Amino acid sequence: MSATRPLHLAAEIGGPPRYDADSHVALARLAEQGALDFVTLGDSFARPGPDALAVLARVAPATTRIGLVPTVTTTHTEPFHVSSAVATLDWVSGGRAGWHADVSTTEAEARLFGRRGAAPAAALWQEAGETADVGARLWDSWEDDAEIRDVATGRFIDRDKLHYVDFEGSTFSVRGPAIVPRPPQGRPVTVFDGTGGPARESAARYADVVYVRATSPEQAASLRADVRRIAAAHGRDPDTLRVLVALTVDLGDAETAPEPGLESGPQLAGRGTYFRGGPVDLAELITQWHRGGAVDGFHLTPITPERDLERIVNGTVALLQHRSLFRTFYPGGTLREHLRLARPANRYAHARTAGATS
Amino acid sequence: MKQMHLAAHFPGVNSTTVWADPRSRSQIDFASFEHLARTAERGRFDFFFLAEGLRLREHNGRIHDLDVVGRPESLTVLNALAAVTDRLGLAATVNATFNEPYELARRLATLDHLSGGRAAWNVVTSSDAFTGENFRRGGYLDRADRYTRAAEFVSTARELWDSWTPDGTSRPFAHSGQHFEVSGEFTVPRSPQGHPVVIQAGDSDEGREFAASAADVIFTRHGTLEAGRVFYADVKERLAKYGRQPDDLKIMPGVTVVLGDTDAEAQQNAAEIRRQQVSPQNAILALEQVWGRDLSSYDPDGPLPDIEPDPDSGLVKGRVRVADPLAVAARWRALSAAKGLSIRQTVIESTARQSFIGSPQSVAAELETFVSTDAADGFILVPHLTPGGLDDFVDRVVPLLQERGAFRSEYTGSTLRSHLGLAEPVWKG
Ligand SMILES: Cc1cc2nc3c(=O)[nH]c(=O)nc-3n(C[C@H](O)[C@H](O)[C@H](O)COP(=O)(O)O)c2cc1C
């Protein structure tokens, strides 16, 4: 691939639990000043913190362009509720919603619900994939022009443009159609972390954005190729996928490392996902990895959002913009537009048109 | 003077919203929710209310296509509305059958935090195999079990909300009951209201008992003066055995208001709205809901059918079927014969739901009478237009109520509990 693919940047605004709206709004607005594609908010039933999707719904009217991607776990929730809530986030944000599908693997989380015990990761990732699959079907279950308001016949909707999904998964079934009309983006953006083996399979099959973890551009390129290969094997066009390197960043106190360069500058450590250095060093790393065509972009998790996000936006991003490697404004309004992902055609509308002409 | 409480019902999915009116806007765009919520807050209302339905209704085996349909998910919309309002309470209807206490308690506590103490939960119990087909657990719950699950659901949620001490320490919880076996640590600290406000909507004996034992507000359909007083007395009397005071439960019927410059003009407006609500197609549909039969070949401007209703009909799905179709049919026939009414005219006359029709002065006086004579503690106003349906009420009736001292002129507190005059729940650690 050429090295001129646009660079995509996203940032996590979580960190220590906060329950007020203002601090979340301030961080999202900061990221929006940097024209980042989207912010994420992590979530889990296992540790303190508010419901992430609710927080980003609260943030939506207080921001205008930035994509909003909460983590939503799929293990103990109802797939029908998940699809309704994510579609609604898309409605209240005017087409800026995504969701990061995750699983709950622990017995402690299972006991909070008392419905079933903990299950092996492979089964849970398969279920997460099915949740994404049925979600997409439910989002398609209303054709875009299903609401007709036809006074002459007294019909508010054209029922031929609403569809039962009749989904049978390994652990659940859903009849449909959705109760929420098709959201502005057609389908909100689905994000999976493709780091683990079973997760990668579901990610490549169902996600629009996949995170990978790598310690070198070579490793990132190979993971990206792997995700694209699995996607293609499932009949997807790999160019409908964006592979982002997930990086935890600690921008410390330094403006830049003393001598930018491999030895004294950025250090990748731990599970290969940890970056430590100055904002300029981070810009260097992003530039190098992206120029080499290894990745489509980065998902950055600042270890201290209040401090590091400011450095990312005013340091790293500003420099990337100066080098014309990253946009300075949002040319579009929806998250799909930021990511240069097309608005998906409705599978049912297509089936009907195809059926009519055959 | 006893002051009234007012709430705004977003019309959303129902058969009374006049979507063919040129002023009718989207029932799904956020701008519509924002308009009605801001209107309600301008009117110093207690809260904004969203209903819920978890399956699209069907009629005669097909998706029902005449009424407004399609709505966003309530809690997500309310979190967004918290960004564009300051004081207004935010009430979500959420079914207690197709949700789990841990997840819902967490979502409600989150809304309470993000809105600064304005969250409410309207606990509904409706469940059937039809709705259940969208969920993991299916529609297994018998009617008799719905309120036992709802009651245990609410008490479990309260245990979770109380598992953090008021000074912010989390403690493990464990609940073991008939419907739930849950334990662990709750992830959200005690929220500004302690517990979000709990609303109940449902009319059976079990429903009233559940409200008397556990709810802060009851949403009823008893919108006439007589029915209201009977219901009010009945429910308030039930409180004592749960150690509660009459003021601990607010009774708020869902009502409609039609205004005009004069009473006569308001009557004309009301008649016109009824005609819009009952289109020819809707008239036949209303008839089919009573008869339980396909009556599509009947002329809405012609006479009522002379065949009898089918009491065991499965024609209507996703909404409550008329309780005694034979009796209703007999009543409608008698009305039609006495006044010489067509099908459509009969439906218009017999399904009229408008509660308050008149000039702003008349409506204000009548609302006050309801409250001062204990037919209600307040009202949930259900407009027939989205989203501008309460503009006139707020501009013309609210100032009169305020002048009379029957309604607040300013919010005195910041939480929904304070608007409703409800004490913060005692922490039961
Ligand atoms: C005023 C009112 C509003 C209601 N709104 C809803 C609603 O939005 N969603 C829902 O599923 N059920 C709704 N219900 C149904 C009730 O929750 C309940 O399931 C139903 O009335 C049967 O219970 P009951 O026998 O106690 O009346 C409503 C009921 C009433 C009386």
Image (cartoon, rainbow, N blue to C red):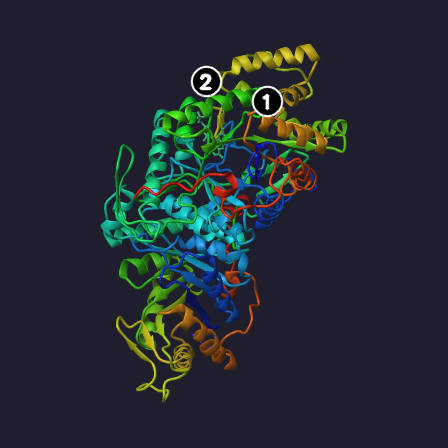
Residue to which mark 2 is pinned: B312
The label number, if any, that marks residue B225 in the structure image: 1
Against B203, residue A143 (above or below) is below
Q: Chain of mark 1?
A: B
Closest to the observer: B306 or A38?
A: A38
Subunit of label 2? B
In the structure shown, which secondary structural element does the residue marked by tag 1 occupy? helix
Residue B111: percent from left, percent from top: 45, 49
Q: Amino acid at mark 1?
A: Leu
Query: Residue A149 appears at what percent x and percent y?
Result: 63, 40
B288 to B186, vertically: above or below: above
N-term mark: 2 or 1: 1
Secondary structure beneath label 2: loop
Who's the residue at 39% across and 34% down the image? B132
For residue B18, side relative to residue B59 (left or right): right
Q: Residue at x 25, y 54 (%)?
A: A121
Residue B259, given in percent of the width and then of the height, sits at 70, 33
Which label lies toward us, 2 or 1?
1
